[in-house]
Image (cartoon, helix red, strand yellow):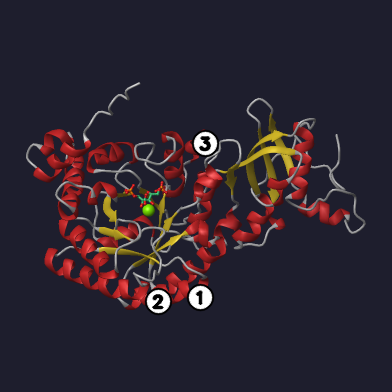
Amino acid sequence: MMIYGNCEFVDLKYKPKSTDLIVEYYVEPAKGETMENLCEYLAGESSIGTWTKIKTMNSSIAKKLKPHAFFIDKKRKLIKIAYPEYLFEMGNMSGILSSIAGNVYGMKQAKHLRLEDIHFTKKMVKSFPGPKYGIAGIRKITKVKDRPLIGTIVKPKVGLTHKQHADVAYEAWMGGLDIVKDDENLTSMTFNNFYKRMDSTFKARDKAEKETGEKKIYLANVTAEWYEMKKRAEYVKKKGGEVVMVDVLTVGWSAVHSLRILAGKLGLFLHGHRAMHGALTRDPHHGISMLALAKTYRLLGIDQLHIGTAGIGKMHGSKDEELSIEYEIENQDIKADEMLLRLSQKWFGMKPTLAVASGGVSPLQVAEIIKVMGKDIVIQAGGGVHGHPLGTRRGATAMRQATEGAMKNIPLKKYAQTHMELAEAFAKWDKKPKKRKK
Ligand code: CAP
Ligand code: MG
């Protein structure tokens, strides 16, 4: 076997320690490479190795910091590497990812590489803030105790003026939704300035709360460069907001962490939108799994995170994968017998992150989503509210009715017989796909 730099990293007899960070990768060696050699390259390049023997290496560095590739499954193309936690700076997600998800992607020796899962050590988990509010905290703020939270995304994604945006939001809240959210690509536009949007939308929120007697939540998208993002979050707080939304991938891990620190001080919870995740997660043979990404965002303190709709909505994603993501971000702490079944993360008391099901949802899918994902979720519908034949307010009501029907275990088609808005939603969306003419 070749040696990458000064040490050998493959050791199939190695028993991982509780102080090891474990990473599972899917790997395909480039032509002419063996799986073992590739493990040497990957473990070395992600830790202390380089392409040649170096004079500056010494045995104490190797002893303390050397990772072990301890598992190779050639058939499934899976490997596991155990990295001593001493190799990493605690509480620095960017630094950790620059090691285990950094240069390794560019190495010629790997044709494909996908980081499938990460298992963090107790010390590492404890070094991150985690959600400040988590599921129980969000339920307390929203006063919604025993059903999923329901919301909409103002549509069109971008294009409305700040006044029109506030009007649409008001209609949605009045129709019965708990949450109104900015879209991921709505920031501060020439025709819809962030600060003006906050002024008008929080005014509409206050009015809707007064008129309905219910708590209403506005998820303002603060995505921007850090100093501006900070200003925007502070403005949301000033306006009486409880939460800010951030596009976690496009702003980057470091900014998410900083925002969590700021939000913690301000008393805001965090909604994480995952725009761009598909670039990393979609190829089953290359990139980073959504499961691994979701774990990093729980550690950094995202209180609620988009994870997909278990294959029910418009976005690409499999039911099994998304349910395991929901399990990972929402579990409190794993029981010993479950630990044997799945190599799950132990969270050491870190608060759970609430799963957000969004993308291509209409009232018609609400019961199925709850059945599959449970009631500890946020269900969002953009097109499925503003596309309702009777408009946004009635579309919101249809979503609320669908949620009520589902919670009462009444088939939604039956519930629609006595609920006009839901019936209208069925009339529009309950259509069998037409067969294409050849
Ligand atoms: C939903 C949504 C979200 C997607 C993203 C949108 O709108 O706001 O961005 O849910 O996917 O703009 O598409 P619709 P995911 O209800 O109109 O589809 O949640 O899987 O990250
Ligand atoms: Mg969106």
Q: Is residue 410 left or right of residue 241?
A: left
Q: Secondary structure at mark 2?
A: helix
Ligand 2 under 8 Å from disc 1 Cβ: no
Instruction: Answer with mark 3 or mark 1, whichever residue precedes in sequence.
Output: 1
Please provide percent x and percent y for residue 295. 51, 50
Q: Is residue 84 left or right of residue 393?
A: right
Ligand 1 under 8 Å from disc 3 Cβ: no
Q: CA distance from mark 3 to mark 1?
A: 41 Å
Q: Is residue 157 above or below residue 336?
A: below
- Give the residue furthest to the left: 418
Of 18 and 250, nearer the camera is: 250
Question: Which of label 3 and label 2 is nearer to you?
Answer: 2
Question: Which of label 3 and label 1 is nearer to you?
Answer: 1
Q: Is residue 81 above or below residue 192?
A: above
Which residue matches tag 3? 342
Examine the rendering and report whether any part of residue 162 can be seen. yes
Please provide percent x and percent y for residue 334. 47, 44
Q: CA distance from mark 1 to mark 2?
A: 11 Å
Q: Are marks 3 and 2 in contact (CB under 8 Å)?
A: no
Which residue matches tag 1? 227
Q: Looking at the picture, which amino acid does disc 2 mark? A: Glu
Q: Quadrant of residue 1?
A: top right
Residue drawn at (56%, 46%), measured in percent from left and top? 280
Please provide percent x and percent y for residue 438. 35, 21
Residue drawn at (17%, 70%), measured in percent from left and top? 207
Which residue matches tag 2? 234
Of 29 and 240, nearer the camera is: 29
Q: Quadrant of residue 426?
A: top left
Q: Looking at the picture, which amino acid does disc 1 mark? A: Tyr
Q: Secondary structure at mark 1?
A: helix
